[in-house]
Image (spheres, rainbow, N blue to C red):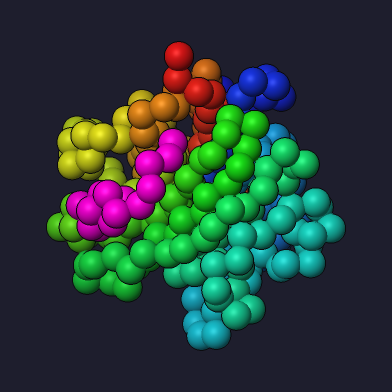
Amino acid sequence: MTRPDSPRPDTLRLASYNIQKCVGLDLRRQPQRILQVLDRLRAQIVVLQEADKRLPPRPAALPHFMLDEAGWQIADLGGAGSLGWHGNAVIWRGPDITVRKTGHHDLPGFEPRGAVRVEFDTVLGPLRVVGLHLGLLARSRREQVIHMRQDSRALSDMPTVWAGDFNDWSRQPVLDHLVPDMRFLPPLPSFPAAQPLGSLDRIALSSGLSVRAHGVHADRPAHIASDHLPVWADLRLAG
């Protein structure tokens, strides 16, 4: 596992983190631990999963005011009182990042699932970030990835990152092969946090982007703050 130092000026650090509604492995809901992990990641953009509580009206598990006080900005994805949409949220901080546009995608499958989309202006130029939390069933995951690929074809051409909890335990690149126009970074074990075995949390890049470094962040309190560890990547323009 690679501990993230400060990102270089010519890169942008993006992270993905399933925060399990801020309930840690000790079964205590402690949003402040999640904020500590986010701070130590040193990421400029973070895609979150399970950011809202389970039952309607699905209030934010990680309160807005705590993120505000920590200097994070929250993409408006249309969830009244929620942090995001279908539990997916995107937050960022730093003076060199502004939001162009937001949106979301209904995903097919046995369970209700969705993906969120935020288009930014960044130090790398325009960047589209898609946050996903795929289903528990293999068939649903395949349908959801194919659906997301089809939806993406209708969007304007822009360097794009997919990041999230793909829920895929397979040691074979099953989902990777379904989206040949996206390059998945090598899988790294991120689940369960106490003794990571499964590479459930993934990041994929479109053409136009490359990665200088990527890793899993396991420093305290990440080992207990959620059942997942966050993954991160330092992005730069290809070539």
Q: Answer yes or no: is residue 19 visible.
A: no
Residue 103 appears left or right of 168: right
Is-magenta flag for residue 18? no
Residues 231 and 238: in front is 238
Q: Which percent across, then down, holds residue 105?
A: 36, 64
Q: Quadrant of residue 74?
A: bottom right
Which residue in the rendered view is the most extreme toward the bottom? Answer: 56
**Residue under the point 71% across and 68% down:** 63
Q: Which percent across, then down, holds residue 22?
A: 62, 61
Q: Quadrant of residue 86?
A: bottom left
Is-magenta flag for residue 145? yes
Q: Answer yes or no: is residue 69 visible.
A: yes
- What secondary structure is the stretch in magenta mostly built from? helix
Residues 21 and 224: in front is 21
Which residue in the rendered view is the most extreme toward the right? Answer: 69
**Residue under the point 33% across and 68% down:** 106
**Residue under the point 52% across and 50% down:** 119
Q: Which percent across, then down, holds residue 124?
A: 58, 30
- Quadrant placement of the C terminus: top left
Residue 101 appears left or right of 136: right
Which residue in the rendered view is the most extreme toward the front? Answer: 156
Residues 82 and 207: in front is 207
Residues 42 and 96: in front is 96
**Residue under the point 44% across and 36% down:** 159
Compared with 46, 40 (above or below) is above
Q: Which residues are magenta?
A: 144-159
Which residue in the rendered view is the most extreme toward the left? Answer: 139
Q: Which percent across, then down, holds residue 147?
A: 23, 57
Compared with 199, 110 (above or below) is below
